[in-house]
Amino acid sequence: MRTSGFKLVLLATALVFMVVGVAAAEINMTMYYPIAVGGKPYQIINELIQGFESQNPNIKVKAVYYGNYDDTRTKCLAALKAGEPVQLSVLFSIDIFDLLNQDIIVPWDDVVQTDADRAWLKSFYPALMANSMAGGKTYGIPFQRSTIVMYYNKDAFAEVGLDPEKPPATWDELVAMGKKLVKRDANGQVVRWGLSIPSTGYPYWMYQCLAIENGLELMNKAGNEVYFNRPESIEALRFWHDMAYKHEIMQKGSTDWGTLRQQFLGGSTAMMWHTTGNLTPVRDGAKFKFGVAMLPAHKRRGSPTGGGNFYIFKKTTPEERTAVLKFVQFMTEPINTAKWSIGTGYVATRPAAYETDLLKDYVAGFPAATVARDQFEYAVAEFSTHETARVKKFLDDAIQAVLSGKATPQEALNKAQQGADQILGGYR
């Protein structure tokens, strides 16, 4: 009897330790995520999280949603400074230098453990890795990524005698077609512009397109030099200005990022430049035939990449890092990347996603979904430097000054260059 009782005590003790061990093994992760983009990405993120947790019941992921990328970064960094547990976040790909300077992220090279993990690190489109690596190490995993594309109203093209299947491929064609597409009422008031390019929200990003197309990348890879007042840069900003003031194919002054999609869907502009992250909302909301095209070329084609990467923070335990790696690998599995791309319009960040039956079938019926991906061939890194927010503020202010008619491109960009040099001089 004593032996049996002793065995029962041992069994009960073992069960207690097992229960405690299971409880201790549960890992809770917090992820900050920006949602001020087209569509309803949080719904898809929530669905993917549920799928991950069903496969990994010992890992719980809490998504904290905020507005745009800047809002998310501010809230996320504040939480980290306050000592709150935050293991990962999707933040701007261009935040990489600032996050490194603050010493709050770790390279994924230090997190991966196996040859399969290392192969996964190299499985993303090279164009997307330009804003994801620094010093030969990978700090960002591409996820909510994009390029800028041109949306155009095919019905409007047909209305004015333009071929709906031949959008403008050059700056000259853009101006010529834009003039034909401008529509006025009986009083001479414009009711439809030929083209709209947003100048709020991310003006530097839109301007970067024009600079690239004019043969210039605005910064070096080290993020400590910018070329705002080069002749190619000045010419690019002058062209943006002239499309409104000289060619009169777009409205003067400011064009709002947040409302432009609705203006396009409402027919008040025949063409717009915007993120491919708006592809699904445009598809769902358009009451007319529309097309999607690469941006027109001048000296070359080109668009900066854009969007957000997964970052992992330093204040994580080894167990948390393993869990974060498992989660991010799940989120970027080809089938999940395909689901994400279809649901939002963002680019699938891995070539393997386009080999899934799901995405093959989708693009077969909706070829526009491949335009942003195909533009990778001409894409460059989005504008990113040390102290990016401060530096690009000088550029944003220059753009606004020129588009509002308050300064010439030469004057505005000289001032922006001077301000940027004062900041970046210490990093050279």
Image: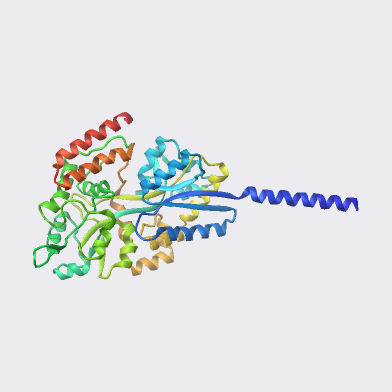
Could you say which is closer to the camera, residue 426 or residue 111? 426
Which residue: 27% across, 70% down? 287
Q: Position of residue 340 (x, y in %)?
A: 42, 60
Which residue: 42% across, 45% down? 75
Q: Quadrant of residue 232?
A: top left
Colour setup of the view:
rainbow
Q: Position of residue 322 (x, y in %)?
A: 55, 47
In the depicted structure, whether residue 154 falls above or below residue 171: below
Q: Quadrant of residue 344?
A: bottom left
Q: Position of residue 382 (x, y in %)?
A: 31, 46
Confirm whether residue 102 shows in the render.
Answer: yes
Which residue: 30% across, 60% down? 371
Could you say which is closer to the camera, residue 366 or residue 393? 393
Quadrant for the C terminus in the image? top left
Seen in the image, is 52 located left or right of residue 168? right
Confirm whether residue 129 shows in the render.
Answer: no
Q: How many numbered marks does the figure carry?
A: 0
| Residue at the limit of the structure toward the right, as seen here | 1
Could you say which is closer to the camera, residue 289 or residue 394? 394
Could you say which is closer to the camera, residue 188 or residue 319? 188
In the depicted structure, whether residue 22 falls above or below residue 371: above
Q: Position of residue 136 (x, y in %)?
A: 41, 39
Seen in the image, is 202 located left or right of residue 16? left
Which residue: 28% across, 35% down? 225
